[in-house]
Image (tube, rainbow, N blue to C red):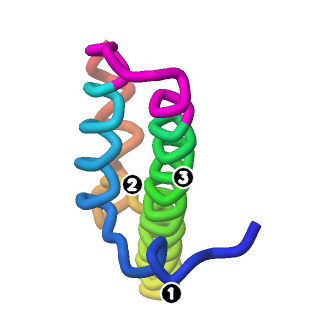
């Protein structure tokens, strides 16, 4: 499937808001079969636009988290709270 200029220009919030309106109109009824089909097709297009935006956002978050993890690993930290003396495990074991 190719991405149209309109899909590129349409932001997530715009696509979501229009999709909400399409769903509202379909649920309200009162449209002809042809109008309903056109609305449904538009809704499918809008849902794909939203999915692309969300997938892109997820990829950016995953990349940022991986980058932060790599930076933490390079600093020699593993994310665990430990006593600098190495006694954290002993202190935790005595709290049962």
Q: Which residue is at the front of the view, 45 or 64?
A: 45
Work out how far the residue at label 2 is from the one at label 1, CA to CA, in angstroms.
15 Å
The overriding secondary structure of the stretch rendered in magenta is helix
- Of the two numbered discs 2 and 1 on the same chain, state the one appearing first in sequence: 1
- Relative to 68, residue 50 above or below: above
Q: Which circle's residue, 2 or 3, is located before the other in the chain?
A: 3
Q: Kindly report the distance in space between the C-alpha atoms of the residues bearing marks 2 and 3.
A: 45 Å
Is residue 30 shown to the viewer in this render? yes
**Residue situated in front as seen by the camera: 7 or 89:** 7
Q: Nearer the viewer, mark 3 or mark 1?
A: 3
Magenta stretch containing residue 45, yes or no?
no
Disc number for residue 45:
3
Q: Residue at x 41, y 41 (%)?
A: 89
Range of the magenta residues?
26-37
Which numbered dot is residue 9? none
Q: Position of residue 83 (x, y in %)?
A: 28, 57
The quarter of the rendered structure image containing the C terminus is top left
**Badges 2 and 1: C-beta atoms under 8 Å apart?**
no
Residue 80, label in figure: 2
Q: CA distance from mark 3 to mark 1?
A: 43 Å
**Residue 37's quadrant in the figure?**
top right
Q: Position of residue 56 (x, y in %)?
A: 50, 68
Q: Residue at x 45, y 76 (%)?
A: 6
- Mark 2 is surrounded, within 10 Å at the Cα level, by few (under 14), some (14 to 19) or many (20 or more) other residues, namely few
Query: Cβ–Cβ below 8 Å for labels 3 and 1?
Result: no
- Given residues 13 and 19, the one toward you in this image is 19
Residue 61 vs residue 80, the one in the foreground: 61
State the residue position of label 1: 74
Is residue 78 among what the camera can see?
no
Q: Residue 43: x percent and y percent?
A: 47, 41
Residue 18 higher or lower than 57, as above or below: above
The residue at the point 45 percent across, 22 percent down is 32
């Amino acid at each position: 499937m190719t991405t149209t200029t309109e899909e590129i220009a349409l932001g997530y919030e715009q696509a979501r808001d229009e999709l909400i309106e399409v769903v509202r109109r379909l649920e309200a009824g009162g449209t002809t079969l042809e109008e309903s089909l056109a609305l449904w097709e538009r809704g499918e297009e809008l849902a794909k636009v939203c999915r692309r935006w969300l997938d892109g956002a997820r990829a950016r978050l995953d990349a940022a988290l991986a980058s932060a993890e790599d930076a933490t690993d390079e600093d020699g930290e593993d994310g665990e709270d430990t006593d600098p003396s190495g006694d954290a495990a002993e202190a935790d074991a005595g709290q049962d």
